[in-house]
Image: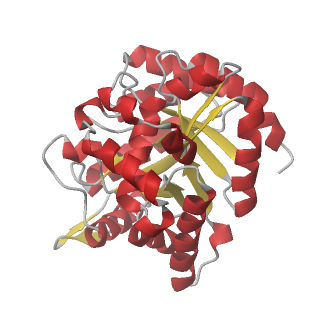
Amino acid sequence: MPISFDAAILPNKPILDCLQIGQAAEKLGYSGIWVADSHSVMRDAYGLLAALAMTTDRIKLATGVTQTVTRHPAVLANSWASLQELSGGRGILGIGVGESAVYNLGLKPEKLADFEEKVRVIKALIKGQSVCYQGTDIQMAWSQMDIPIVMACSGPRSLQLGGRLADGVLFQVGSSPDFVRYALDNIRLGAEQAGRDINDLKLYMRVACAISENREQARDEVKGYASVAAGTTFKTVPKEYFDESLWGQLDRFKAAYDYAEHGSNEARHKALLTDDIIDSIAIAGTAEEAIPRFKEIVEMGVDGFVMPFGMADPYPYMKSFAEQVIPKFAEY
C-alpha cells in the first residue's frame, strides 16, 4: 500500500476555523482528514465532516475517532452512509471504545465483546443488510454503501480484535520503535487468528508531530496532543515495554491529567511532559530529525500516519510537514 499522511483536526476551536484547516489540508496534499468526536469538549465531528464533504474534492474524510457508547449503531450507520453519499465515497469510519467522550459524561469505555458486536451491526446496516441487534431485526434498506472501518486500538486485546475484524487499524502507542513493534505484533496475531494477512490491512499510526526550523518551539507546540497520546500509551502498553524511568515520569503525568482540558495546548498538565516522554510519544523537532524516524517506522510495516495538528495556529506546521517530509516518501 502507498504511504499516506493524514491531518487530524481537534475541533476545540471555532468550527469555521476547523473547516479552513481541513480545506488547507487538501490543498497541501494530505491524503485524509480525521476529525475527533468528543462532544463535551469539542464541536460536533459529523457537522464538520458534512461541511468538508461539500467543500473538498479529493481528500478522505474520517472520524478520528467516533465511539459506540453514546451513539447507537443504527445512528452511526445512518450518519456514515449519508456522509459516504455526500462525499462521493471518500469516507473512512474510524471507531473506538471511547475515551474523553465517555469519561466526561461519567461513563465507561465500551467492553470489547459489545464493541465487536456493534461494529458488525454497523457494517451490515451500511450495506443495507438486515441484522438482529438486541433481539430486534433492524435494517437501513436505502443504503447500499461499503465504507472502510478502521478501529482505533492501543491495548493488546483491542489490537488483536482490529487484526481479526477491521479493514484497518489506527493505533496510538507513541513513537518508540519498541512500542510500535508491540502494536504490530498484536495486530498480526489477531489477523492470523482470523486467517487474514496483516498486509491486507491498512496500518495507521496516530502520532503527535510538529516540524519546524525552531526545534524548541516545535517541541512545545506538540505538547497539547502529546498529552493525549502519553495517557493512552501509559494506560494500554504493557509495563514491560517501558524502562523504569519513563514509566515513573508517565505515572506522575497521568495522575495530573484533566479530561476537561483533553487535547488542549493550554492544558496545565502539559508542563509535566518531560523530554523523555516527548521523545517516546511524539516526533517533534526539525525535518532532518523527523524523516529518519518516520522511515524506520515505515520499514516496520506502517503505511499510514495520522497527525493531530492541535496548535493554536496549525497551518505553518501542516505546511512545513507537507513540504519537507511528505515528498521524501513519494517512492515508497
- Residue 117 position within the rendered picture, expressed as x and y whole percent measured from the top left: 31, 70
Residue under the image location 67 percent in, 22 percent down = 212
Task: Describe residue 25's horizontal placement relative to residue 140 as left or right.
Answer: right
Residue under the image location 26 percent in, 69 percent down = 114
Nearest the camera: 162 or 224? 224
* Furthest residue in direction front, as rendered: 245
- Residue 103 position within the rendered picture, expressed as x and y whole percent measured from the top left: 20, 46
Evaluate whether residue 1 shows in this view.
Answer: no
In the displayed structure, 142 sits above or below 326; it is below
Nearest the camera: 196 or 245? 245
- Residue 288 position within the rendered picture, expressed as x and y whole percent measured from the top left: 78, 33
Nearest the camera: 215 or 55? 215
Evaluate whether residue 214 shows in this view.
Answer: yes
* Furthest residue in direction left, as rendered: 106
Task: Describe residue 263's horizontal placement relative to residue 167 as left or right.
Answer: left
- Residue 330 position within the rendered picture, expressed as x and y whole percent measured from the top left: 83, 42
Q: How many marks?
A: 0
In the displayed structure, 66 sits above or below 25; it is below
Q: Quadrant of the N terminus?
A: bottom right
